[in-house]
Image (cartoon, helix red, strand yellow):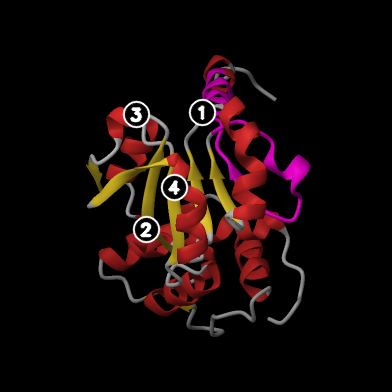
Amino acid sequence: MGSKYISTSVIRRLPRYFRFLNSLKQTGMIRISSSELAERMGISASQIRQDLNCFGGFGQQGYGYNIEKLQAEIGKILGVDRGLKTVLIGAGNLGQTLAQSIEFEKRGFNIIGIFDKKEALFGEVLRGLPIRSADDLEDFCKENHVDAAILCIPFKEAAANIDSYVKTCGIRGFWNFSHYNINEKYPEVAVENVHFNDSLMTLCYRVINLDKKD
């Protein structure tokens, strides 16, 4: 694959392929054609072929795709086996919910530290890890060479600490729930922003327009 540029739109479709293929694998299916996969996913077969061809292509003409092999290959591309060293910053309601409900290890991340600024939380155990003081984050990151952070803190707190997270802690990727625009200041850092309100308002629009015709 080398340094070939892959568009963000292609990359964002890969997790969906991975998820669909996993569901098919659980049913016992062995192989599937691009047209059948496309029908199940609601996209075009040519789109699937174009996306996979960005990484060399994995199908055989007249045979289709081996489901288990294709899922494994997409998993390698996404890095689900990498176990990136990750910290959770913000152990409030949202942080605790994410920590308890998501299998991060199956998605390429290994949570090795959890931090918060509230003293009442210090020492509580979450995912088998004690919640530490946010004051200890810099030393922890330096000692453990942390790759990524799950940022579950308010906008102002993120803005006040982003220099420390990037420059001192050396964090290279953020799953960002803070609404602070990290890439505006650090465009070289990998960021996935999560905006629940945006998603909710998008759903509202779709619901109220269900009966409208093109």
Residue located beneath label 3 in the image: 93
Residue located beneath label 1 in the image: 196
Q: Disc 1 to disc 3, how far (Cα)?
A: 15 Å
Against 122, residue 198 (above or below) is above
Tell me the kind of residue under disc 3.
Answer: Asn
- Magenta-drawn segment: 178-204
Q: Residue at x 61, y 38 (%)?
A: 161
Numbered badge on residue 136: 4
Q: Disc 1 to disc 4, how far (Cα)?
A: 29 Å
Q: Position of residue 197 (x, y in %)?
A: 54, 23
Nearest to the eye among marks 2 and 4: give it. Answer: 4
Residue located beneath label 2 in the image: 112
Is residue 122 within the magenta segment? no
**Mark 4 or 3, nearer chain start:** 3
**Mark 1 or 4, nearer chain start:** 4
Q: Secondary structure at mark 1?
A: helix
Query: Left or right: where does residue 73 sit relative to residue 6?
Result: left
In the foreground, 211 or 178? 178
Q: Dots 1 and 3: beta carbons under 8 Å?
A: no
Q: Position of residue 54 (x, y in %)?
A: 68, 73
Q: Residues within 10 Å of mark 2 (few under 14, many from 20)?
A: some
Nearest to the eye among marks 2 and 1: give it. Answer: 2
Q: Disc 2 to disc 4, how far (Cα)?
A: 13 Å
Q: Dots 2 and 4: beta carbons under 8 Å?
A: no
**Mark 2 or 4, nearer chain start:** 2
Q: Residue at x 45, y 40 (%)?
A: 134
Tell me the kind of residue under disc 2.
Answer: Ile
The quarter of the picture where the C terminus appears is top right
In the foreground, 48 or 143? 143
